[in-house]
Image: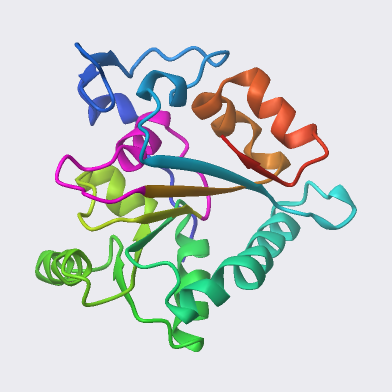
Amino acid sequence: MARSPTPDVRSFFPRHSRAGAVGGTLDLTHIPDDQGVLPLLGRPHDTRHIVRRITVPRQSRDPSVVEDARLNHFLTHLLPALRAGSLPGCLIYVNDSLDFNRVAAALAKESVDCAMLSEDVSDTAAKEAKRSFAAGMVGALLLSGRHFFYHRTPPRGTRHLIFYSLPLHAPLFATLATPHPSSTGALTVVSLVSSLDAAPLARILGRSRARNILNGKQDIRTL
């Protein structure tokens, strides 16, 4: 499957959103890179953001090397917890279609109890996957970037959110990382990042914080 281009996000999002807003609305169409969207969401006491920096061999900027390192990081550091059932209600967002297929194959190989939402599933199958996830009938839900871009409805029942790769548009991150109003538990958000993620990370965290995370000594940051 080829890597598919994504249409202009402005035609899919309203100018304002109430996600995370206190006493008003947020303009998500004009977010300065030096600020990022995360500070605009506020700091819900029941949400924790963790950024994990991927170790890339020889600091390569070859996309194929980086994506191999990303998959290895996921398999080494996150998959064991998924397999053991230690991350209930785990939503895994994968921005790229090729990466989505690689992660799906890895989860199937490890027999992880997981439903999937991609641009290839029917509306009926998508509704069933969301229902099963919300009811706790499956432990994880794999979500493709293109499916979420077009549907934009966050699945209910998310307690752990893994951004295997970051969305290119900050409003997508904001929508997923904002706890659902009906949620009663805490939400943990884990983002995997590499040096190639500088631009989307800046849109989310702001330029200064993104630079510190990518160039600092710590591989794991809790925000």
Q: Is residue 181 above or below residue 100?
A: above
Query: Is residue 137 part of the magenta span, yes or no?
Result: no
Rendered residue at 68%/68% (across/down):
72
The magenta stretch is 164-186
Q: Position of residue 126 (x, y in %)?
A: 17, 65
User: Which of 60 and 39 lies nearest the eye of the viewer?
Assistant: 39
**Is residue 156 left or right of 115 when viewed as pictured?**
left
Q: Position of residue 41 (x, y in %)?
A: 36, 24
Q: Quadrant of residue 157?
A: bottom left
Q: How is the image coloured?
A: rainbow
Please state the horizontal and vertical placement of residue 212, each as a whole percent of the image: 73, 27
Left or right, 199 with respect to 133, comes to: right
Give the vertical position of 188 relative to 206 (above or below). below
Q: Is residue 55 above or below residue 134?
A: above
Magenta span main SS = loop
Depicted 82 relative to depicted 38: above or below: below
Q: Is residue 158 visible?
A: yes
